[in-house]
Image (cartoon, rainbow, N blue to C red):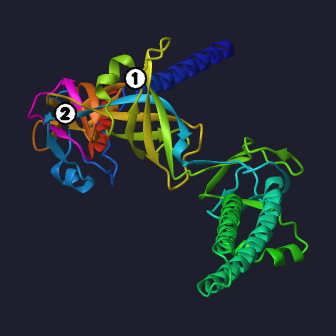
Amino acid sequence: MEPGTKKQNWTIAGIAFVALMAGLAIGVFFFPRGTNSTPPAAGAPVKSEKPSEASPDTVQITPESQKEVGIAVETAGLHNLRDTLSATGTVSEDPLRVAHIRPLARGLIETSYVHLGDRVSKGDPLVEYDNIELGLAIGEYQTAQAELQRSLTDLEIKKTILDRGKEMLKVGAIARTAYDLREAEYKDAEAKAAGTRATVAKIVEQIHRFGWTDYDLANLAAKQGSGHSISHSVLKAPSSGIVTNYHASVGEVVEPSTELLAITDMSSLWVLADVFEKDLAHVQTGKAVQVRVASYPGKVFPGKITYVADIIEPKTRTAKVRCLVENSSGMLKLEMFATVEIPVDRGNSVLAVPDSAIQQIDGKPVVFIRNSEKEFRKQEVQTGLASGGYTEIRSGLKAGDPVATQGSFVVKTAFLRDLIGENE
């Protein structure tokens, strides 16, 4: 054989070998091994069986596996569900729990003991100021007290003279007209003393309004001797709460009309919600509501409706609904946005299943109906209202259908695993 012919034969043999190997690779790719050639993985959480004649919408799970993973079944039935009306609102203070602190008289602020946002307790000092009117009242009190003392002394002297005149009249030592004159002088002194006493009482009452007590007045001399100005007044917290408004600057001259600060009791707040006109028939005072805020997604604040406005807002066609909400935890803050859930009773029963029975496949709600001891069938449903742990089923089920509830997610997982296996 010639050399050129031998080289050509080796080339043809090489091409044939490559073609054979490529054919084997294509055969392996397009003709995989059968599903029965490889046993299922050991230790799988759910053992499912799917005969070749089974419906593609079913999955079979052995009773033993159902028991291990806790799959429970409940029949669909009629339930009275409570609807929920949602309204947006804003957290606000209860005006009855807000103390507006104003000076009792004109004065000059000298010390401030609190700041905006501080928590205070009842009786805590808030602001100390030089009370001009208090100083004047104390001066008037001292003058009136001195006048009262003179009046009482004069009254006592006149009484002594009158008593002596009475004895002298009995023995004829003085004339009747002289005695009558002494009696008139005594009554005049008595009237003056009574008038001065009333003036003192009036001034004392005025001083009491500035926070002074009878003990303070009794120790007035000691206060004056201490070097501390007796005209200073201290405003104290009338209740516990948070300082939510503050306008008290040291050195500022204030009037009785000036609000220095406000103390808000945050233990109970208002939530003012806007309810559409068409929904007002479901809103009544005294009805319990649930309030939620974005800051605490899983937290529910119980409350109740205390007022429904009689005026409809023309532009929004809504009415203000006031809810009283307990806030002892202090989690709610003023001006927070809130959602108020108002329960609405439905007049008729509806077909419903537990919320745990509803699963999602391809974005659609489904349940799994138990066909037999070990077979579940996927069933698409149309859901409605959800309330009290149950979901309304508007179509896809009928009363008495047994559906997987607890553990339905495991049934869904087994179903999807079998579905993927069939499509491989």
**Position of the N terminus by quadrant:** top right
Classify 278 as above or below 306: above
Quarter of the image for residue 388 reads top left
The x, y position of residue 37, in whole percent, is 30, 40
Quarter assignment of residue 280: top left
The percent position of residue 407, horizontal first and vertical second, equals 27, 46
Q: Is residue 129 visible?
A: no
Q: Residues within 10 Å of mark 2 (few under 14, many from 20)?
A: many
**How far is the residue under mark 2 from the one under mark 1?**
38 Å
Question: Can residue 405 be found in the magenta stretch?
Answer: yes
Q: Observer-nearest residue: 387 or 359?
A: 387
Q: Is residue 2 above or below residue 404?
A: above
Amino acid found under the numbered disc labelled 2: Ala
Q: Mark 2 or 1 closer to N-term?
A: 1
The foreground one among 45 and 185 is: 185
Label 1 is placed on what type of residue?
A: Asp
Residues shaded magenta: 392-406
Judged from the image, the secondary structure of the residue bearing numbered disc 1 is loop
Please tell me which residue is depicted at 57% across the width and 16% down the height of the picture. 12
Residue where numbered disc 2 is placed: 352
Q: Is residue 322 visible?
A: yes
Q: At which x and y percent is residue 385?
A: 27, 29
- Residue 353 placement, left or right of 85: left
